Amino acid sequence: MKQLKLASASVLTLAASTLSTTALADDLTLCWAAWDPANALVELSKDFESESGHTMNFEFVPWPNFADRMLNELNSGGKLCDLLIGDSQWIGGGAENGHYVKLNDFFDKESISMDDFAPATVYAYSTWPKGTPNYYALPAMGDANGWFYRKDWFARDDIKAAYKEATGDELGEPKSQKELLQIAQFFQGREIDGKTVYGAAIFTERGSEGITMGVTGALYPWGFKYENTPGSYDMEGAVNSPEAVEALEFYKELYSTATPPGYTNSYMGESLDAFKSGQVAMAMNWFAFFPGLYADPDTGGDKIDFFVNPPQNQAGSTLGGQGISVVSYSEKQEASLEYIKWFSDPAVQAQWWSMGGYSAHNSVLNSDTFEASAPFAGDFLLAMEDVQDFWQEPAYAELLLAMQKRIHDYVVADQGTAKEALDKLVEDWTEVFEDEGKL
Amino acid sequence: MSETTVDRVARKTPARVARKVKGLSDRAIAWLFVGPTIFLLLTINIFPLIWTINLSFTNFKANRPNRAVEYIGLRNYERILGDSDIWLSMQATAHFLFWTLFFQVLIGFTLAWLINKKFKGNDLWTTIIVLPMMLSPAVVGNFWTFLYQPQIGLFNYVITFFTGADPSSFQMLGSVDLAPWSIVIVDTWMWTPFVMLICLAGLRSIPDYIYEAAEIDRASKLRQFFTITIPMVLPFLMLAVLFRGIENFKMFDLVVQLTGGGPGSTTEMASINLKREAFEKWRTGYSSAFAIILFVTVFGLASIYVKALNKVKER
């Protein structure tokens, strides 16, 4: 009888442990854009799978469709994504519309401190309302718009001499936006090794966010501001300030005098293609792509170098990057939070950086070895000191599309003046904020 | 004796079915048959239309479920009709519509007229000509994007061959002046075969004896063309214009692939504008009003056109 009881107890224990394991192991889906860092995250997450028993699935959407696809998913209360690495501008809508889970209690419970992450990334990727200690994401991928160039061309004596003769200056990494333009114009249409090359590949894409992300790379160094007083939505005189007008005129000149022919609707992919095919001397793109560019067998290694977006009146770079959030419609929030806890671990963050992801954790960024760990690491730190982001309001999509239209109309379609474009932008944005009840 | 079709049709209703419909009037049976169709029509077409009309009077935003929905009367309609950007997109649509129809009718009819002549390899040429319309618009858009590429695109090299201009000196998709024409060229390339096929059906429906009678009356070829061919093909041609007109009024995929509505807003058709308002800016109320305006425009123009078509047929 005793043996029977023992056997029954053993069977029950075994069944219970099997059941509990089954109940704990979840299939999680993480949604992000389809790009190099996403592939690194797949590799990184294998450790999480082996540690937790959960299975990670990934839904990666190409950048031009990323916002459309994911915002549709959130707006329809879809359960595709348990975890979402959403763009920084979505944080307002994610928080106010209830798409993202507020993480404060979880952070407190698990002793995850936002002080452990770079302040600019916490501000941009995690907080809503901006700057308040209300967290809806953990900084996952620091990023900014930077530049890379053909180091081998810049080092050639014949090209250096030609540049000196043409401009009177030494050829090197540009120290200002105007110097960048001068270098780009110098390379435009030049014959190098029997091939015609061009100055710079910049962002001009119309459909999603391309030209806005590109032009803000000029606007911020000129001192562009979205509002005269933060939080007041008083844009007249700020958005269309004389500095903003000058910066916009500069970007148009860069586009019309120093980019490859047909470069009218170009974003990340086109910039990478132009550089890798040896068409351009310089190109702008997100730091996220820099590890891949450096590893490129044809134009990477000794042939490439990187520089932070040059200053003009001040230093300024366009912020990229994203935070990782738990989707409120997910039925696997516990397991999703487990993933965030695992991801926030300094050891995992160090591994994330080593695999090609841009950690925003201070333990990684402030380590003695960080700057020397990659040829672009120092530039990344510099860029993150002076990043600025686009509006992060719940109505960000309307604000973004208005800017896409006004800037593309002026820069690419050559319609009107820079002042008119920015005046119209103020009108558009005012209308949006009036509809939102904020004006 | 084997059973004929008439016998089969007239066969007595099986007892099993007869028992079920026993006691039902003819009208009830008729409703039984058309009921499911009417239900589907109401569910899929009529209800969404009524719902869209309802939304068009509100400030509803589908991405802001927590925001209170207010009825704002005709404000959306007033804003749309007073919005210069909307009118620019309507102009872009009208330009695209007019010139694609013009070229497709001209070239389509000419090709049909040539194909209708009996010559060797007639069938092979017909097959080759209709190939473009069998392709997906996404494929065609990508394919032509490469052809129009200023540095490596074949199109610019062909123009260079004939004009001597530097291939990199002009951009079909990037130029404000050329972009509207570049999408007209692609749509014409793709859909002229459709117009040709309809015209060919019209040409082949003209009995030979009419031409023989005209020959006997010593009517010249030109006279035969204008007094026999054109009038008899006209209803077919008008039908082709109706089909292509409705299609091109809502043109979206091809233009998005080619220009994305750019440069600037040069090729931003009404349908692209509507999509941006509805699913990118999420101005659901506003875009519903815009959709209703477009619907009324297409429906109104199509109704007038169909009346004209019927008159031509009656002649």
Image (spheres, grey):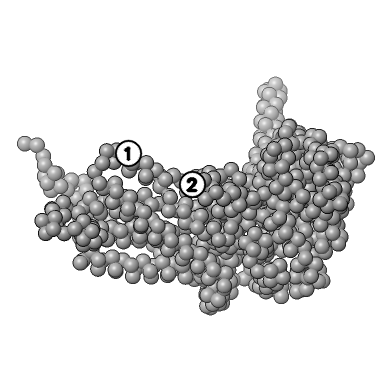
**Residue name at image x 75 percent, y 52 percent:** A185
Point out which mark residue B124 bears: 1
**Residue name at image x 76 percent, y 61 percent:** A250
Q: Is residue A190 above or below residue B297?
A: above
**Residue name at image x 72 percent, y 37 percent:** A193
**Residue name at image x 84 percent, y 59 percent:** A312
Residue that lies at the very extreme toward the top in this rendered image: A3
Pointer 1 chain? B
| Residue A167 visible in the shown view | yes
Query: In which quarter of the view is residue A296 placed?
Result: top right
Q: Position of residue B240 (x, y in %)?
A: 33, 57
**Label 1: which secondary element:** helix
Instruction: Please tell me which residue lies in front, A183 or B82.
Output: A183
Query: Left or right: B128 with respect to B161?
Result: left
Q: Position of residue B283 (x, y in %)?
A: 59, 66
Q: Position of residue A423 (x, y in %)?
A: 70, 72
- Mark 1 surroundings: few (<14), some (14-19) or many (≥20) residues within 10 A: few
Instruction: Please tell me which residue lies in front, B204 or A208.
Output: B204
Same subunit under labels 2 and 1? yes
Residue, disc 2: B140
Q: Position of residue B63 (x, y in %)?
A: 61, 61
Query: In which quarter of the view is residue A179 placed?
Result: bottom right
Query: In which quarter of the view is residue A181 placed?
Result: bottom right
Amino acid carrying label 1: it is Leu
Residue that lies at the very extreme toward the left in this rendered image: B1
Looking at the figure, which quarter contains the C terminus of chain A? Answer: bottom right
